[in-house]
Amino acid sequence: MKLFQCTNCKNPVYFENTTCEKCGNNLGYFNTIEEILSFPAASKTVYSPLQQGSALTYCANHKHNACNWLVSTESGTSFCEACSSNRTIPDLNDAENKLDWQKIETAKHRLFYSLHKLKLPTKFNINDQPLNLRFDFLAPDPNNPSAIKTGHANGLITLNIQEANAAHREYIKEQLSERYRTLLGHFRHEVGHFYWEVLIQPNPKNLDEFRALFGDDTQDYAAALQAHYKNGAPVNWRENYISSYATMHAWEDWAETWAHYLHLMDMLETSYSFGLSLDPEISKVLNLEVACDFDPYEEKDFQNIIKHYLPLTYALNSLNRSVGHQDAYPFVLSPPVIKKLTFIHKVVQF
């Protein structure tokens, strides 16, 4: 993600900030130009830098401390693009539900930032049928907490809001022997299924190349799921897959790899925005010497992206270990996985 600053006092601010700690102004994100706008704390609106006299105001979910995006007062909707995609949200009268939902919205808005950077629409017409990205955020029944499953079907992504609870998420992570489990990761994975339906399935050329790389998408999914949880992943899965779960079915391999594509693009843009470069104090390791001097969203050559990304993951994991945390990116990108990522980059870019 790019860096942001208050347009009033130039203080660096985060993507989620609603107030500048230095000058006290309100802050709102204007997705159209990918910038944080600053305006007086007493004001309810700010004028758009794109059109003279056009006023912007906070998304309706700002009152719930769940969104800092700005919408045009003339748009006919009180919700921003990200919040407009919600079909169902939990009962906000429950304080715990509300807290979970706020965390969920934070992750989802970062997802929408990435989709905007990649110029990926969220509304399509496939074979004369609308296919739109939508979300159900559901609170589980205390008497049947496992009834709500996170997943995707025909553009609708369902998320059990317990995933916003760090203790619950860590418990599931341990139960499934996962090395990585985050809210943002969930969004990036599930949205991958949506884009398979709009970028791969209707396009014969893309579908043929997909099958050559990821496998047979016509394999019975329920049977594959049952076999995966019964037998586990192949012993040598790391040679061809980004995760053990990716071995379950071609769809899951695509979704897992898609999520990692969004991970690396976001991480590289952040590094570019900070002007990061690596010049390690060890000899004869030239592949660790990189300067993040390009915007990955403008880069056509995926090999250049990978060349810069891999050293960054080593540095990131080393920094995490320095403060007693586990690796932030506990994955190895094998040559077959890089080929899959290259295919995704080509499909998205062209």
Image: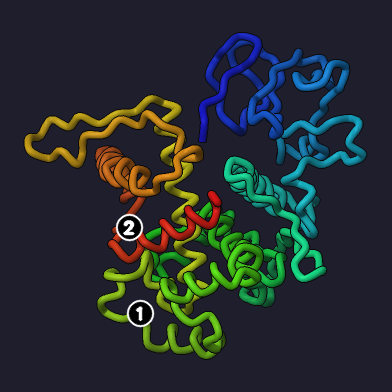
Q: Is residue 215 above or below residue 130?
A: below
Task: Please tell me which residue lies in front, 349 or 289.
Answer: 349
Residue 103: image location, x then y, percent: 62, 47
Amino acid type assigned to the residue bearing label 1 in the image = Ala
Instruction: List the residue tagged with mark 2.
Output: 331
Q: Is residue 227 left or right of residue 222?
A: left
Identify the image quadrant of residue 342: bottom left
Q: Is residue 324 visible to us here?
A: no
Question: Where in the figure is residue 34, as x and y percent of width and height?
Answer: 64, 31
Query: What residue is rendered at 65% in x and 59% in y?
Result: 161
Q: Position of residue 16 (x, y in %)?
A: 61, 33
- Indicate whether 183 appears above or below 24: below
What residue is rendered at 56% in x and 24% in y?
4
Extreme residue toward the left, this view:
283
Of the image marks 2 and 1, the number of the one nearer the N terminus: 1
Q: How far across and down, in percent of the image, does residue 123 sit?
A: 75, 56
Instruction: Using residue 171 as the reference point, say whether residue 67 is left or right of it.
Output: right
- Which residue bears the numbered disc 1? 233
Element carrying mark 2:
loop
Q: Disc 2 residue type?
A: Phe
Question: Can residue 179 be seen at all in this image of the molecule?
Answer: yes
Q: Nearer the viewer, residue 307 or 76?
A: 307
Residue furthest out toward the front: 205
Tell me the element at label 1.
loop
Q: Residues within 10 Å of mark 2 (few under 14, many from 20)?
A: some
